[in-house]
Amino acid sequence: MGNQGPKQHGYRNMALKRTGDGKKTNQKAYIKTFGCQMNEYDSERIAYHLTKAGYTLTGRLEGSDLIVLNTCAVREKAKNRLYGHIGNLKKHKKENPHLIIAVGGCTAQNLRADIQKDFPFVDIVFGTFNVSQIAQLVAQKQKGRSNICGVKEQGFDYQLGQSVRPQPFKAFVPVITGCNNFCSYCIVPFVRGREKSLPPEAIAAHIKDLAHQGVKEVTLLGQNVNSYGKDLDQAIDFSSLLEKMDPLGIPWIRFMTSHPKDFSPKLVKVVAGCDQAVNHIHLPLQSGSNAVLEKMNRKYTQEHYLGMVQDMKANMKNCSITTDIMVGFPGEEEKDFKQTMHVVKKARFKRAFTFIYSPRERTAAAKIKDVVPLASKKKWFGELVAVQNRISYEENKKMEGKTFQALVEGYSPKDKGLLQARLYDHTVVLCRAPKQLIGKMVYLEIKQAKAFYLIGNYQGKC
Ligand code: SAH
Ligand code: SF4
Ligand code: F3S
């Protein structure tokens, strides 16, 4: 799943609500999110439970009464950054002894005892299976009770709809949580448990409700959406789920992440045939070398992957493919890296999230001693990024002069005089248009391509 830097919920102006027992509170909660969309969704759930308990959400750390860090464990860097962040909170605690600090998410699930030992001023540690209990934990802490929550795997502990969306016109809808794949480098199965699909009836009811609320874009979430339904009693797979969701009134339905081993020609046909499912597929490659893919336990080959790319490009109009790629997996050699570059040049991804392999304790790959020298990792990473950036720019360039539907999301963070919109494949387009269009679908003509975004002319509402 795309995983780009920490985010925070900025609900500064949310009205005060009453607590369950009827008392008004003026307590402020600050939530910071690290990691992927599944964690962003969990933060939306944290926001729901805290506002229900009377908290107001704030985008400012200073002056908050409760700080929640929702953590990621996918790479060592994420953990190191988290440790830096927690360390910095100590001074806030000194200034405000009533401040409650809660650490949740994947690193909390993985290293709960270490966090408590290394940072005794952290009040609450809660795992990925205990998000719904956050308000109770805070209440217990306020009464002076102990501060660690059980982190036992328990599948879903929530209902769809119990979340507060930062942008009312966009919604995440998890359809399957956990992962059974155990790619040899990956910590996710250890911190998110086994696959668990939500019943299709619950998903459909929620999506109908979102359509009723005027939501423009829904992202169906799962570590591997293509595993959807395998654990359910009824015969349903992800393509049939998507077909059922298509007519429910959401203008854009997207999904991520697809695993190449389970990605089927049937899904390509369904996406191509659906009106609302967008023609964008995020299909992580990881490596183009068959030897490395085997050691990664990915269960597909370069040839299979390229076959799927061909199928998508032949059958989906304006098909846009994005990916994740890793360099420096144990034992990777120059010849393996060349195979990755071969796929990158052939597949011509619209965008790629690129990573240097990071050993994760408990995973199978962490036990392999054949470590790639840092110099090679850096060299390969630089080459990969340079070639992909060139391809992204060339692919963006092909869009110049064409008109696309776009969803206006807000102001551009770089230039407040411009609005930022996104195309069906999440490419950013900056444009000059009235601010009343935020949250609306519009037509934009692409005037100019940059490597990472586009500049467009507003043509009118959809
Ligand atoms: N479920 C998704 C991805 C989850 S993690 C999938 O199957 O693709 C998001 C991305 O982080 C992965 O695609 C991978 O490229 C990267 N990643 C995962 N573990 C990593 C590790 N140990 N070191 C470096 N990158 C890693
Ligand atoms: Fe990790 Fe592989 Fe599962 Fe993705 S499919 S979450 S990379 S184990
Ligand atoms: Fe996501 Fe990071 Fe957890 S990528 S599932 S938040 S380890």
Image: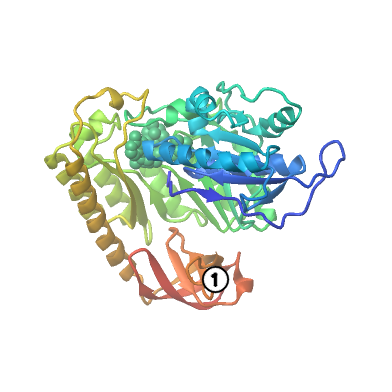
Question: Which corner quadrant of the image does residue 135 belong to?
Answer: top right
Q: Is mark 1 within 8 Å of ligand 1?
A: no
Looking at the image, residue 411 lies above or below residue 288: below
Element under label 1?
strand
Q: Residue at x 59, y 31 (%)?
A: 121
Q: Residue at x 50, y 28 (%)?
A: 118
In the image: residue 116, left or right of residue 11: left
- Mark 1 highlights which residue? 442
Q: Which quadrant is home to the N terminus?
A: top left
Looking at the image, residue 181 lies above or below residue 320: above
> Which residue sits furthest right?
22
Looking at the image, residue 12 lies above or below residue 244: below
Q: Nearer the viewer, residue 216 or 61?
A: 61
Q: Position of residue 359 (x, y in %)?
A: 31, 31
Q: Which quadrant is home to the C terminus?
A: bottom right
Q: Position of residue 387 (x, y in %)?
A: 22, 57
Q: Position of residue 399 (x, y in %)?
A: 35, 70
Q: Position of residue 205 (x, y in %)?
A: 67, 43
Q: How is the image coloured?
A: rainbow
In the image: residue 42, left or right of residue 346: right
Visible residue check, residue 251: yes
Q: Where's ligand 2: which quadrant? A: top left
Q: Residue at x 67, y 45 (%)?
A: 29
**Label 1, residues with CA under 10 Å away: few <14, some 14-19, many ≥20:** some
What residue type is disc 1 on? Answer: Val
Question: Which corner quadrant of the image does residue 391 belong to?
Answer: bottom left
Looking at the image, residue 35 lies above or below residue 183: below
Q: Residue at x 46, y 40 (%)?
A: 84
> Which residue sits furthest left?
335
Q: Nearer the viewer, residue 166 or 266?
A: 166
In the image: residue 242, left or right of residue 146: left
